[in-house]
Image (cartoon, rainbow, N blue to C red):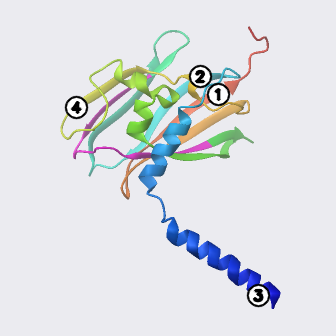
Amino acid sequence: MIVFKVFAAYMGVIATSAVAHPAPNNHQDAGLVSDILTKFHQNDYKLKFERVELVRFNKQYLKKLEVVTYKYNRTSPVVNVTWMYGTDLPDYDAVVQAYRFTSNEYRLFPLRFQMSVCGAIKTSAAGLQTLTHCGNFTGCPFLKDVPTRACNWSPDETRFPPFIPDGEYMLEIQMIFRNAELYVLRAYSSIYRPIVKK
């Protein structure tokens, strides 16, 4: 009987706290994640960026989307992106899932988060602010029927989370507006630690 009373009291506390704190808005949570990502600063490892590829895009929202990776010089690959939206988008979310290359395939790695794209660009998460340095992209919002280009972008390794293990990684980045998938990208890179630290 005592166990039942304790259980009933515990469930009452949970029900009361659920009513007092309604379910958070996913877009607000995405903004919180991009705020957390701005706190990342590391010099523990080096990031060898390889490429970004476009998997698919939704032609109801995008009239054009091209992603091209090329060598800026002998050692630095960079990405050029060209797009034209078919509708005005004030902001949308990115769902990022990491995969690590083991046993001759990319396997699920326990790193997954969702963030606001405009918030990530504004706070320069992973160096995204440099998208506005080359081309005619000036930031959010994303406007309808405006051909936009961002060029010579590469990730900033100092703005990544610390203590990620060495290895080859793939990030699958799914862009979502409300309940619709806009496009999916895959980014490939390697993480390594230098033998000699400076």
Answer yes or no: is residue 195 visible: yes
For the residues carrying marks 3 and 2, which lies nearer the camera in this image?
3
Q: CA distance from mark 4 to mark 2?
A: 31 Å
Residue at 45%, 44% in the rendered image: 31
Q: Quadrant of residue 45?
A: top right
Q: Is residue 53 left or right of residue 170?
A: left
Residue 190: which disc?
Answer: 1
The picture places residue 18, in percent across and down from the top left corner, at 55, 70
Looking at the rendering, the stretch of residues picked out in magenta corresponds to 79-98
Proximity of marks 3 and 2: CB atoms separated by less than 8 Å: no
Q: Is residue 103 left or right of residue 52?
A: right
Q: CA distance from mark 3 to mark 2?
A: 53 Å
The picture places residue 76, in percent across and down from the top left corner, at 52, 15
- Quadrant of the image for the C terminus? top right
Q: Is residue 58 left or right of residue 129?
A: left
Answer yes or no: is residue 95 visible: no
Q: Secondary structure at mark 4?
A: loop
Instruction: Identify the residue under disc 3.
Output: 4
Q: Is residue 168 left or right of residue 129?
A: right
Instruction: Identify the residue under disc 2.
Output: 158
> Label 4 is placed on what type of residue?
Pro
Mark 1 neighbour class, 10 Å CA radius: few under 14, some 14 to 19, many 20 or more: some
> Label 3 is placed on what type of residue?
Phe
Q: Is residue 94 magenta?
A: yes
For the residues carrying marks 4 and 3, which lies nearer the camera in this image?
3
